[in-house]
């Protein structure tokens, strides 16, 4: 067997709905089932989802306070007031700032932007920045992608006589800021039909309202922030993303063209992954390591030379960020292993001085991937006595709700159920850890700490084709709540397997089902190669793609996980490196090494395998061993098949590793035939006596036999009472009775040993596996009897 590393949750399918969508929309059952599993259950919903670019944007004035905000902004423009856009330093914040800055400049506003420094100011609006804005002559501040938690800062703005408009999408707290206007789809009494806009989506709606039309030229910027911020890709977010990606492929924005160039992106192949893995990380890297202003300047500039210089600088910052993340992740793992073991910490709260607060969110995500625990990573500032950090969660643990119970020690915090940011006094770090651990103990079970992998649909290999994979792209762009489809193939035969890559750490498998085959690749899954036996029947999950090579296009599965539900046989007969095998398999606690030799038992004990080794002296001893669900290494050959048969009376092992090493090879030794015995007996009768001790080897050489053959036949004759042997001298017994050779224990034992070797050593892999299958069935009968 092979257990999956994750919990596969297969979405239930409504076959009647799938059939309805298939027939009504002329789509494949595979795509129809994917739609149904995403909660799209009507023809109208499905048509809207598949043809989202044909849908219209909602009226922006449905957002509460939108009219009030538009009137105030237009008044400020008419009066030449100085307007400040107050943004955030991540990709969503930079995109939001760019969208509104572009719009207000288009309208002729006197506008500048301000993004706080992550290191010196932290997240969100702050009093000092507001006071400086007032001194600098700004009479209107508009926040983008931030501000919903700025209760104190709103009071400061009011005190200063500065009007404040908040546009945000983060979870509103119990008390909202007293601002001139709050544009937030989730605030109470807001009738806006779509609640899940990113920060840039809210800024885009404000631009829409200000301009009186959809700002189509800003869709590519809005798509970057929307995808980067991991909001749900349904509704307007899907409309923004799909149309924005299309626009991005032919962008005329100078800064984006430069960034795409340094990222080595082929514009024709741009999709949501381009944003998620090429553009967003680079934009984010700026604000993670320094002021985020260059990212906004890049998106706003029309100077190609300036754009390319900024893009190169941003690319270098991203590489620096990657090195920093790797180093901090190693240090964070060391903290967990030495100070906060996961057995005692269902929530990980890790804090250290000197960590860069700009990348703690990425490190938190890495720890969640590594340990699958809700994780908070904090950067400690001893001088100020504070800790700043980010949190990432797992399914089943609502971070925002849990952190909300700790508001008394979290003066600055905000976020979502799965992610949050915060600042707290250093003395309260341990308090926060204790509280969250106590909450987790009441909410999470042991099962919750195994990652969930949602599977969209189970497929037969015959259902997978280039055409069906191409049609799945109708569901793109993929992202939150619309992930790339994960499919499962069940009960497929492993036709081929090998490790690939320079370090042999990747895996290539070929599955077979009836006459159909499917190739699959698992990056970083090379270790699974040693966990799969030849021609095993297995199940796998992954994402489908099309592999193109020499103008030939074939379906391919990008592996996520593999499991085997049946027992497996691993054939190591003839291996010369038994020590290597034992070191590998004995890393699993439930491994039992079976030996039938006392000397081998002692050797293995001396090598440190005393917890794994079992010395089987008899069938009764074999029967006492519980090998159910164990990994069994059968090191040598028993003297009797009974010693193997009775191993399985208490259950079936998950795996059997057969080594069957032995010192002597009976099967290929000289085996005397009845003609050998006949000639040798006639020879002894003629001689009367024969000194086998002195002349046995000479006789063997004369006949072309081995000395052991002479000794063996002599012992058989002795046991059958055909001869007597005294001091190596054989004398014939004239009174002997006719008897069959099989009546000799030595002869019978030799025959049993030969048959044993033939069965265990010289059969094919499939024959040996079937032999074990038969043993399992026989043992079941034995137990039932």
Image (tube, rainbow, N blue to C red):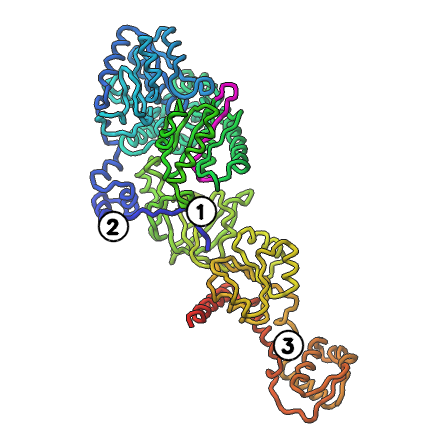
Q: CA distance from mark 2 to mark 1?
A: 29 Å
Counting from the top left corner in percent of width and height, residue 516 is at 38, 55
Residue 554 seen in this snapshot: no
Determine whether label 2 and label 3 are within 8 Å by CB: no
Q: Earlier in the sequence, mark 2 or mark 3?
A: 2
Where is residue 150? Give x, y as percent. 34, 19
- Image-quadrant location for residue 24: top left
- Residue 687, position in %: x, y? 75, 89
Mark 1 is surrounded, within 10 Å at the Cα level, by few (under 14), some (14 to 19) or many (20 or more) other residues, namely some
| Frontmost residue, 215 versus 192 | 192
Does the magenta portion include 458?
Answer: no
Q: CA distance from mark 2 to mark 3?
A: 66 Å
Residues in magenta?
A: 369-385
Q: Which residue is mark 2?
A: 15
Q: What mark, if any, has residue 671 been given in the picture?
A: 3
Helix, strand or loop for disc 1: loop
Residue at (32% x, 37% y) in the render: 481
* Mark drawn on residue 246: none
Q: Label 1, on which residue?
A: 5
Residue that extends furthest to the bottom in the rendered view of this protein:
735
Q: Is residue 707 above or below residue 308?
A: below
Q: Secondary structure at mark 2?
A: helix
Q: Quadrant of residue 407?
A: top left
Asked whether 4 or 189 is in front, the reply is 189
């Amino acid at each position: 067997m092979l257990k999956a590393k994750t919990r596969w949750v297969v979405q239930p399918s409504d076959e009647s709905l799938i059939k309805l969508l298939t027939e009504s929309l002329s789509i494949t059952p595979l795509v129809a089932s994917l739609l149904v599993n995403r909660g799209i259950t009507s023809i109208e919903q499905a048509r809207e989802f598949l043809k989202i670019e044909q849908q219209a944007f909602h009226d922006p004035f449905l957002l509460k306070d939108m009219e009030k905000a538009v009137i105030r902004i237009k008044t400020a423009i008419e009066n030449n007031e100085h307007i400040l856009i107050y943004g955030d330093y991540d990709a969503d914040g930079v995109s939001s700032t760019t969208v509104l800055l572009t719009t207000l400049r288009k309208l002729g506003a006197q506008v500048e932007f301000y993004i706080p420094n992550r290191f010196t100011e932290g997240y969100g609006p702050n009093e000092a920045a507001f006071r400086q804005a007032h001194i600098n002559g700004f009479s209107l501040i508009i926040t983008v992608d931030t501000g919903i938690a700025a209760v104190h800062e709103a009071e400061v703005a009011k005190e200063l006589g500065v009007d404040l408009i908040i546009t945000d999408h983060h979870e509103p707290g119990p008390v909202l800021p007293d601002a001139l206007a709050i544009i937030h789809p989730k605030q109470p009494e807001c009738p806006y039909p779509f609640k899940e806009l990113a920060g840039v989506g809210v800024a885009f709606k404000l631009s829409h309202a200000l301009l009186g039309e959809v700002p189509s030229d800003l869709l590519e910027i809005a798509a970057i922030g929307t995808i980067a911020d991991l909001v749900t890709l349904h509704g307007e977010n899907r409309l923004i993303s799909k149309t924005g990606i299309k626009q991005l492929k032919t962008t005329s924005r100078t800064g984006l063209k430069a960034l795409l160039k340094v990222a080595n992106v082929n514009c024709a192949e741009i999709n949501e992954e381009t944003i998620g893995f090429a553009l967003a990380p680079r934009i984010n890297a700026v604000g993670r390591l320094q002021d985020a202003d260059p990212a906004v300047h890049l998106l706003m500039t029309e100077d190609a030379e300036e754009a390319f210089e900024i893009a190169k600088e941003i690319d270098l910052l991203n590489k620096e960020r990657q090195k920093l993340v790797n180093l901090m992740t190693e240090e964070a793992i060391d903290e967990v292993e030495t100070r906060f073991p996961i057995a005692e910490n269902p929530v990980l709260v890790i804090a250290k001085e000197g960590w860069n607060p700009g990348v703690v969110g990425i490190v938190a995500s890495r720890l969640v991937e590594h340990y699958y625990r809700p994780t908070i990573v904090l950067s400690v500032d001893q001088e100020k006595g504070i800790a700043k950090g980010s949190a990432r969660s797992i399914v089943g643990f609502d971070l925002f709700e849990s952190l909300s119970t700790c508001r008394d020690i979290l003066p600055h915090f905000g976020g979502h159920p799965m992610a949050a940011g915060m600042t707290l006094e250093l003395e309260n770090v341990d308090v926060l850890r204790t509280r969250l651990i106590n909450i987790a103990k009441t909410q999470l079970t042991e099962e919750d700490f195994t990652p969930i992998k949602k599977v969209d649909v189970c497929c037969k290999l015959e259902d997978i084709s280039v055409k069906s994979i191409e049609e799945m792209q109708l569901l793109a762009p993929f992202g939150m709540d619309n992930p790339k489809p994960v499919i499962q193939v069940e009960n497929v035969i492993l036709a081929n397997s090998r490790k690939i890559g320079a370090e042999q750490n990747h895996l290539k498998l070929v599955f077979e089902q009836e006459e159909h085959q499917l190739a699959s690749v698992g990056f970083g899954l090379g270790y699974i190669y040693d966990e799969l036996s030849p021609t095993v029947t297995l199940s796998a999950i992954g994402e489908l793609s099309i592999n193109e090579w020499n103008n030939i296009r074939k379906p391919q599965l990008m592996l996520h996980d593999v499991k085997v539900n049946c027992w497996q046989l691993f054939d190591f007969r003839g291996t010369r490196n038994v020590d290597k095998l034992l070191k590998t398999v004995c890393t699993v606690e439930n491994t039992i090494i079976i030996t039938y030799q006392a000397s081998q038992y002692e050797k293995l004990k001396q090598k440190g395998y005393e917890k794994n080794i079992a010395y089987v002296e008899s069938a009764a001893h074999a029967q006492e061993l519980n090998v159910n669900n164990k990994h069994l290494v059968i090191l040598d050959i028993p003297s009797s098949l009974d010693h193997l048969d009775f191993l399985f009376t208490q259950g079936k092992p998950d795996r059997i590793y057969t080594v069957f090493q032995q010192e002597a090879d009976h099967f290929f030794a000289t085996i005397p035939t009845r003609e050998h015995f006949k000639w040798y007996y006639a020879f002894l009768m003629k001689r009367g006596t024969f000194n086998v001790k002195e002349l046995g080897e000479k006789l063997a050489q004369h006949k072309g036999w081995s000395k052991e053959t002479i000794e063996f036949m002599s012992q058989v004759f002795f046991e059958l009472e055909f001869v007597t042997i005294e001091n190596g001298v054989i004398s014939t017994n004239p009174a002997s009775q006719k008897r069959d050779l099989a009546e000799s224990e030595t002869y019978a034992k030799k025959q049993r040993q030969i048959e044993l070797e033939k069965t265990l050593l010289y059969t094919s892999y499939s024959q040996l596996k079937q032999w074990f299958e038969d043993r399992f069935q026989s043992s079941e009968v034995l137990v039932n009897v």
